[in-house]
Amino acid sequence: MFKKRPQNENRHIVAGLDIGTSKIAVVIGERPGPAGEGMNPSGGDGPMLITGAGSAPSKGFRQGVVIHFEEAVQSIRSAVQEARLTAGVEISEVYVGIAGDHIHSVNSRGVVAVSRSGQGVTEEDRERVLQAAKAIALPGDRKVIHILPQEYIVDNQAGIKNPVGLNGVRLEAEVHIVTCTSALAQNLLRAVDESGLKTRALVLEPLASSLSVLEPDEKKLGVILMDIGGGTTDVAMFFGEAIRHTAVVPWGGQSVTNDIAIGLKTSLDDAEEIKCKYGCCHESRLGNGETFNTVAYGGRGPKEVSRELLSSVIRPRMEEIFLLVQKEVKRSEYDSKMDAGVVLTGGGSLLAGAAELAEEIFRLPVRLGVPKGFGGLTESVSSPVYATGIGLVQFGLEAEKSGLAEDHDGFLPIRGGLGRVWKKFRNEFLSS
């Protein structure tokens, strides 16, 4: 049993749960100082502290979707218990990352008349225009999880981040709407519930990762975030400080592992170890004549393999992933505005040569996205592997600092960067 720390009014603890195909990660963080004061996720006053982290093999999940309920629950419990022991605190609520190829998104526009012309746009007007933008035709099996404002327009004046208080008679909103398949999200929620935790909010995983690895100037100039996980690669494009396009490519690091297992005729466990130790997807990162030994199926004698041969197995799959991402980027009207380049994060980004190969394909500057803007367990979690988990903590701390996540019970559709929450939203979701 872990020892529960005493309650302290100067401590505000938040946990994030990142559910992937290969691992489940739980990150616990806190904001020092009185609750509601001094939190700035990008640093500055009262940077957050990461006090605990835990991980477990992701059994019962595939590409973020529950495929075996009991195994999924046990995997979550294992990761949570390790994080609790590390932090020395008990947690009962988490912000849960959601991903998978069932996530779809679309840009939309809403238009309303300002309710009290001459007295300025009110918060109620902003809520009405966001609801108008949300009024899109959706299949019956889909639910909205995020409404992400891109810009507001008041009487044809575009580029407004917050219209409240401005005079005008016509208010418009450009938004990015993220939806998920109801049944799959319900299964995820119930697995979290069964593990003994309450879901504070479902958060799109690349959105969470962006909070921990992207610089404000990158979001302003235009940047492509690629979160390469085990089962999928999540993509988010930012321009003008707003998210413009999101997509999911159904391939990730596990696909590379499978190719190695087939190409070298070895087990998946051995293939994963080989990938991590010797894997490379670009010739610039290969040594001269480097070799290693591998064991074939059935424990047959060791076989010497060159890193060059291994690279020839890995590179085609990584090229395919990057080309599929490039295709998604070209689908967006912002494809020519990604001047800040590409940021790679997630466990798959650690593969040697990934950044070099991405630069070759995208013809843009590429860097590795490592979480930043926090103290505490910096050595343990300063890795792309924890980008989503740390981003979920940042998201939760900012939501609760803003007083926008106090009385909800499950879902947090984002407005103005974070947003308001209704208890009925979760009830409606779960009953659908």
Image: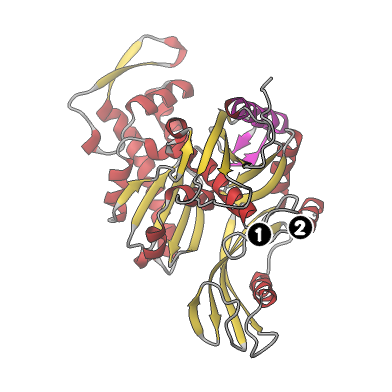
Is there CB contact under 8 Å for labels 1 and 2?
Answer: yes
Query: Quick check: is 77 in the magenta stretch?
Result: yes
Apparent side of residue 38 relative to residue 128 in the rendered image (left or right) = left
Judging depth in this view, the residue of 24 and 353 nearest the camera is 24
Crowdedness near tag 2: few (<14), some (14–19) or many (≥20) residues, C-alpha within 10 Å:
some
Residue 126 rendering spot, x and y as whole percentages: 64, 74
Residue 279 rendering spot, x and y as whole percentages: 34, 30
Q: Would you name the residue on which mark 2 appears?
A: 425
**Picture residue at 69% right of the left edge, 87% below the top:** 116
Crowdedness near tag 1: few (<14), some (14–19) or many (≥20) residues, C-alpha within 10 Å:
many
Q: Amino acid at mark 2?
A: Phe
Q: Amino acid at mark 1?
A: Pro
CA–CA distance in space, label 1 to label 2: 9 Å
Q: Earlier in the sequence, mark 1 or mark 2?
A: 1
Which residues lie in the magenta part? 61-85
Apparent side of residue 276 relative to residue 356 in the rendered image (left or right) = right
> In this picture, is 188 found above or below 364?
above
Q: Would you name the residue on which mark 1 appears?
A: 413
